[in-house]
Amino acid sequence: MIDITSKVNTLRTAIAGAVLKVSLPETIEAIKNDQVAKGNVFEMAKAAGLLAIKKTSDMIPDCHPMPVEYSGIFYEIKDLEIHIRVEVKTIYKTGVEVEAMHGASVVAITMYDMLKPIDKGIEIHSIRLIEKKGGKSDFKDRFRKDLKAGVVVCSDTISKGQKEDKAGKAIIAKLETCSVEIAQYEIIPDEADQIQEKLKSYVEQNIDLIIFTGGTGLSARDITPEAVLPLLDREMPGVMEAARNHGQQRTPYSMLSRGIAGVIGETVVLTLPGSTGGARETMDALFPSLLHVFGILRGARHY
C-alpha cells in the first residue's frame, strides 16, 4: 500500500454512478409497485451498496481502510434505465472515489440479482466517477506561480562545517514540488543579529517567503523565534498550531517546538524546527495550503 502517513486530513467527497438497463417495461413496473419476489429492489440494493462502501478496503487490496462519515445512494428511472448515484464523504488523508464506485457497482449487481428471474436481458454499464473533491488536484492551480523563497539554516555546528545540512534541503525539495523558486539558501550561526540581518535583507529583496530552520527548541542557543518576532507586522498563530498538531500525531515531542509564523508587509515568515524530520513534517503540514495566503495578502477572497 502507498504510504500516506505524511498527508493531512481534509474533507474528501466523491460521487460515482452506474446504469442498470432492463429489457422489459414490466420490470420497471414491478420495481415501482414493489412486486419483485426477492423484495424491495431499491431498499435491498441500497443496503448492499452501503455495506460495499464500508468494505471497500477488504475487497480492493491497495485501498486504505478509512472512516466513512457519510454515504448516500440515489436512483432515477429513465425509460428502461435506472441511473444509480452514490455519494461518499470522509475527513481523511486519501480520497473516496473507489469507495463510491464500489458502492455503485454493488448496487447495480444487487439489482441484477433480484431482477434476473423476471428479466433475462438486463445490462449494467457506465460505472464511473462523476466527481471528486478534496485532494491536492483541487488546489494545484489556485496558487501563484511566481513566488520566490529564501531558506536560512540557523545552526552553529552546520555553519562551522561540522555537520551537513539536511533540514534546509528537505524544505527546498518541498518548495520545488510547489513550484516555488528558491532565490536564496544560506547557513548562519545561531546569532540574533545575523538572523535579523538576513530577514531584513530578504524583505528588501522582495522575497515572498522566508523560512528559517533551526533554533526553535529550548536550549540556550535556540533564539530564532525571539530574533524574528520583533520584526513581524502580524503573527499567524494558526499556522504553527496546525504544524504542531500534525507533528504531535507522529512524535510526542512536537509540542516542544516554539516555531512562529507571521508577515512583514506581503512577505510570509516561518520558523521551523532544525531536525530533518521536524522540518519535513512541518512542510508536509503547511504546504501547499499555506500558499493561499499570498492571494489573501493581495486582497483575494478565501476559497
Image (cartoon, helix red, strand yellow):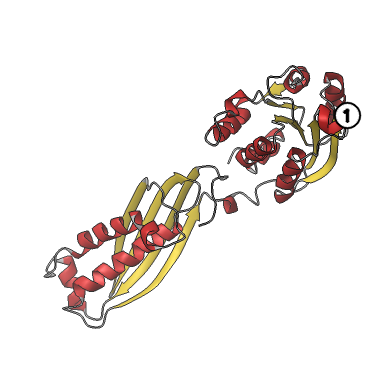
Amino acid under label 1? Ser
Q: Position of residue 54 (x, y in %)?
A: 34, 54
Q: Quadrant of residue 220?
A: top right
Q: Quadrant of residue 117?
A: bottom left
As drawn, is 291 to the left or to the right of 46? right
Q: Is residue 77 visible from the viewing direction of this image?
A: no
Q: Position of residue 114 (x, y in %)?
A: 19, 71
> Seen from this angle, which residue lies furthest front?
162
Q: Which sits in the foreground, 133 or 55? A: 55
Q: Is residue 106 visible from the viewing direction of this image?
A: yes
Q: Position of residue 203 (x, y in %)?
A: 84, 30
Residue where numbered disc 1 is placed? 201
Q: 240 above or below 277?
A: above
As drawn, is 210 to the left or to the right of 247? right
Q: Residue at x 70, y 46 (%)?
A: 174
Q: 88 above or below 299?
A: below
Disc 1 secondary structure class: helix
Count of numbered badges drawn on the protein: 1
Q: Position of residue 201 (x, y in %)?
A: 88, 29
Q: Residue at x 76, y 46 (%)?
A: 180
Q: Which sits in the foreground, 153 or 93? A: 153
Badge 1 crowding class, 10 Å Cα cut-off, few under 14, some 14 to 19, many 20 or more, is few
As drawn, is 202 to the left or to the right of 65? right
Q: 237 above or below 186?
A: above
Please state, as top left, top right, bottom left or bottom right, where the C terminus lies in the image: top right
Q: Residue at x 47, y 58 (%)?
A: 131
